[in-house]
Image (spheres, rainbow, N blue to C red):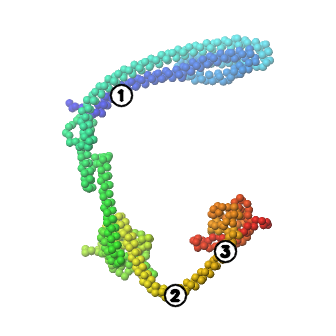
Amino acid sequence: MKKIKLKIGNKILAGFLALILIFALNAVSSILTLKKSNDIIIEIAEVIDPSMAAINDFTLLVTRSKMLTTNWVYLQMNEEDKEALRELHAKEYPQLKEELKSLTTRWTDKAQQQIIDSIFLDFEALLKVEKEIMTILVSFDDYEDFSKRSEANMMIEDDIMTRSSKIIKDLNAISVIKEKETEEAKQNLSASFDTLQNTTITLGLIIIALGLICSFFMARSLTIPINYIKAIILKLGQGELPEDSTKTFSGDEIGEMKEAVDKLVSGLKSTTGFAENIGKGNYKAEFAPLSENDVLGNALLEMRNNLQKVSEEDKIRNWVTEGMAKFGELLRKNNDNLSRLTEELISNLVKYTGANQGGFFIIQESNQEKYLNLAACYAWNKKKYLEQKIYEGEGLTGQAWLEKDTVFLTDVPDDYVSITSGLGEANPSSILIIPLKVNEEVYGVVELASFNIFQAHEIDFVEKIAESIASTISTAKINERTQELLQESTHMTEQLRSQEEEMRQNMEELQATQEEMQRAQNDRDQKENLINRTNMQIELDANFKIVHVNQILSDILRYELKDLLGKSVDEMMASKEAFEGTKRDLKGGKVWSGMLEMMNKYNEKVLVKISGGKIESANYNDSHKYLLFATEFSNIEVI
C-alpha cells in the first residue's frame, strides 16, 4: 500500500480543522445561547418593562382623572385642576393609549391584549361621563343650580368612583401578570448564561489538550529539517557558499525549502562569477537572473549596463578631448597660412571622424559680392566646384550658410555627391554640413560625407571644432586687415607730415575761436541762470511725466523735488480738460503759451502763465521731450 505523504500545510490544516470544528461548535452554541439571552433582554427592555411602566402610568392617569373630576364638581374656583382635566382628555390619554397600543402588539399573550382593549373601552366610557359632568357644570349659575349640582354628585358616586375602581383593579391584574413574566424572563436569562459558561469551559479544556498534542507532533516533524536549513542560511549570512548537499527530506514544504536553498546557493555562485567578470571589465559576460523578481541579479545586470554605458561615455569623452587638443594644435601651428591651415584641417577632420571625404569652404568677397569658395578638400570631386561659386541660400551648403545652422542629411540624393574608390562609386549614407561661425558671424562651411551615419557626439564635436576654426579664420582675416591698415597708415603718415604745418595754423585759429565760444558760453550760462532763478521750469518726457524741475517750482508748489520726479503733470493741473488742449498743441509741435491753474501739495490753486514746446532729443532713442516755463500770477483775478 502506497504511503500517503502529508505536507506541512496539510498537517497543520488537519490540527487546525479539529480546533476550528471545536471552536465552531463553541461559537454556534455561544451564538444560540447569546441570541436567546439577547431576545430575553430585548423582551424585558423593550416590551415588559415599558409595558409595566405604561400600565402604572395608566393606573395613575385613572386615579388623576377621578380626582380632577371630583375637584371639578366640588371645587368651583380651582381652574388649574379643570385645565389639567382638559389636558388629560385632549393629550395625555391619547398619547398613553398610542404608546400602550404599540407595546401590546408585541405581547405574545392575546388574552392580555383583549383585557387591555376592554380597559380602554371602560376608560373611554368613564371619560364620556366626565365630559358630561364638565358640560353640566360650566358657569357660576350651573354651580348654583341645585338640580345640576345633585346630578353631578350622583354621577361621581355612581359612575366615576365605581368605574375607576374597576379599571384600576383590571390594570393591577395585568401589572401582576407582567411582573411574573419579568421574573420568568430573568430566570431564563440566568439559566442561559450558566449553560454558556459550562459549554465554554468544557470546549476550552478540549482545545488545550488538542493543541498540546498538535504542538508536540509538529515540533518533532519540523525541528530537524529547519535546523539543517538554518545552518545553510547562517553560512550564507556570513558570506560562505556551502557545498552541494545530497541530503533529502520529505516531499512537504521542508523539502521544497531545501530545494529552494540549494537553488539559491547555485544562483549565488552564478551571480558571484558574473560579478567577478564585471570587476575585470568584461561587460559582455552573459548572466540569467534566477527569476524576474531576482533583485540581486537584476541589480547586477543594471550595474553592468550602467558601467558599460559609463565606459562608452568615457571613450566618447576621451575621443572628444583628444580631438579638441589635436585640432587646437593644428590651429595654433598654421594660423599664419590660411591655405595650409585648411588643407591640414579637412584632411585630419575626415580621418578623425571616420568620414570618407570632405570639403572646406571659405567666404570670399569680390565687388561687394559674398560667396563660398572651395579652399581645400579631401577625396572630393573638385570638378563639381570648378570655377563655381556658392551663394548664400544656394543648395544645402548655401542654406547652412544662410541659416547659420547645421545640416545633417541621411537620405542623400543620387546626384548630390559620390564617394569614389578604386572599386567604383557609391552614394554616401550621410552628409554633414556645418557653418564656421563665431559670435553669429559665418566665415565658411565644412562639408563631410561618409558611408556611416554620423553619431550625435561626432556632430557636436565637429560643431565645437567649427567654432574654433571660425575664430582662427577671423583672427587671420583681422591680421590681414591689420597689415593692410598698417601699410595705409605708413602712407597716411607722409601725408600727415605735410599737413602738420597747416594743422598748426588751424589750431591757432581754432584756439581763438574756442576763446570766443567760451565767452559766448559764459554769456548763455548767465542768461539761463537768470531765467532759472526767476521762472518755474518743468522738463517732461514723451508721456508728459516729470523728469526734471527747478527749485522755484518746488518752493511754489510746496513739493519735495523727489516727490515730483516721475509724476504725471496732469495730476498737478486744476483742470485736466483745459490742459488737454495744451497737450494736443505740444504734441503737434506748436509752441504754446497761456494761463493755467496748478494745484500745490495742499490742493490749493496757483495761477501760472506757462510757455513751452516740443524738443527732439537724440539721447532719447529718436524720441522727444517737452520743456515748459511758468511764472506765478496768483494775485491776478481769473475772468
Q: CA distance from mark 2 to mark 3?
A: 38 Å
**Is residue 21 shown left or right of residue 243?**
right
Residue 544 found in image quarter: bottom right
- The residue labelled by disc 1 is 20
Residue type pointed to by label 3: Gln
Q: Which mark is residue 526?
A: 3
Across and down, in percent, residue 355 comes to: 31, 70
- In this view, the residue in front, 343 or 370, is 343
Name above or below for residue 155 compared with residue 8.
Answer: above
Q: CA distance from mark 3 to mark 1?
A: 119 Å
Residue type pointed to by label 1: Ile
- The answer to which of marks 3 and 1 sits earlier in the sequence is 1
**Which residue shows up at 62% across the image and 22% down it?**
96
The kind of secondary structure element at disc 1 is: helix
**Is residue 503 shown left or right of residue 406?**
right
Across and down, in percent, residue 576 comes to: 70, 64
Q: Which mark is residue 501?
A: 2
Residue 15 found in image quarter: top left
**Which residue shows up at 44% across the image and 19% down it?**
192
Q: Where's the N terminus, which quadrant?
A: top left
Name above or below for residue 51 compared with residue 603.
Answer: above
- In this view, the residue in front, 68 or 208, is 208
Q: Where's the C terminus, which quadrant?
A: bottom right
